[in-house]
Image: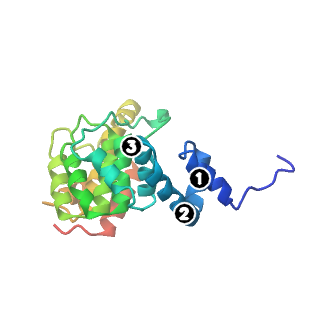
Amino acid sequence: MLGAEDSYPVTKGCIRNAVKGGASDHPDMAAILERPDISLPLLRQAYETASDSETRLKYANILGMMGDGTGIEALLDRVRGAEWDRGWPFTGGGQFGRCLSRMDCYLVSLAHIGDDRAWDAVAELGRRLGPDHRFSHHRATAIAFEKFARQEGARILATVLEKPEMTGHAVGRAQAMRRREFLGSREKNLRELVLARALYRCGDHGAVGRDILQSYRSDIRGHYARHAQAVLEGGTGRA
């Protein structure tokens, strides 16, 4: 709008209000992320003085996403022994709203904190993954396992990928693919790719990750092929 003034830099008062409101909308979260030097002490204080466990968990999640482990115990209390929640399926042009479930967010937060105390809880959820779980759970697990980069994580991911329907979704150049098949297969393709990438970057196990990535190098869909090639070139597969 003509005559409008820039609101940058974000003021301390704006950040204080965003923290007080629990980062309930995108502008508040943007303000918090813009100035971590101001927002992190305020978030830690809000976590310590929260009046109930759900509010503490909300602040713990934000802190974790920013790599701060102040609220790790609240996150672990929620994740230890928990089941996967509903999750989010990849739906192409219809992906409106949240694309990570709450449990997905807790895993990613713990991964960004990088504390070894979180590994057992994260690993246990990863072991339970299978073809019936939605894409967001596979993606969150891949992010978390890559952050921890443990050989045990490679073994877990290799076992997950050996389950029925988890692999074999690359499309070679000799195959034809109708549009409907392409749209319907994207979740399986992305699931297979993100898990294979995490497996490879964790050191691989039995060359499972490498073989999957190799199969996607010649996929007729160039974006999958380029991604697989970049992961292989990046290395860390130690099988």
Q: Count how many numbered circles sit on residues in the image.
A: 3
The answer to whether residue 115 is above or below residue 84 is below
Q: Nearer the viewer, residue 43 or 209?
A: 43
Does residue 77 appear in this view? yes
* Crowding at mark 2 (Cα within 10 Å: few <14, some 14-19, many 20+): some
Q: Are marks 3 and 1 in contact (CB under 8 Å)?
A: no
> Counting residues from the N terminus, which is met first, the one under dot 3 or under dot 1?
1
* Crowding at mark 3 (Cα within 10 Å: few <14, some 14-19, many 20+): few
Quadrant showing the C terminus: bottom left
| Residue at image location 38% in from the left, 54% down from the top | 109
The x and y percentages for residue 138 are 30, 45
Q: Disc 3 to disc 1, how far (Cα)?
A: 24 Å
Q: Nearer the viewer, residue 218 or 236?
A: 236
The x and y percentages for residue 92 are 45, 37
Residue for badge 1: 30
Question: What number is the disc on residue 36?
Answer: 2
Residue type marked 1? Ala
- Residue depth check, mark 1 versus mark 2: number of the one nearer the observer: 2
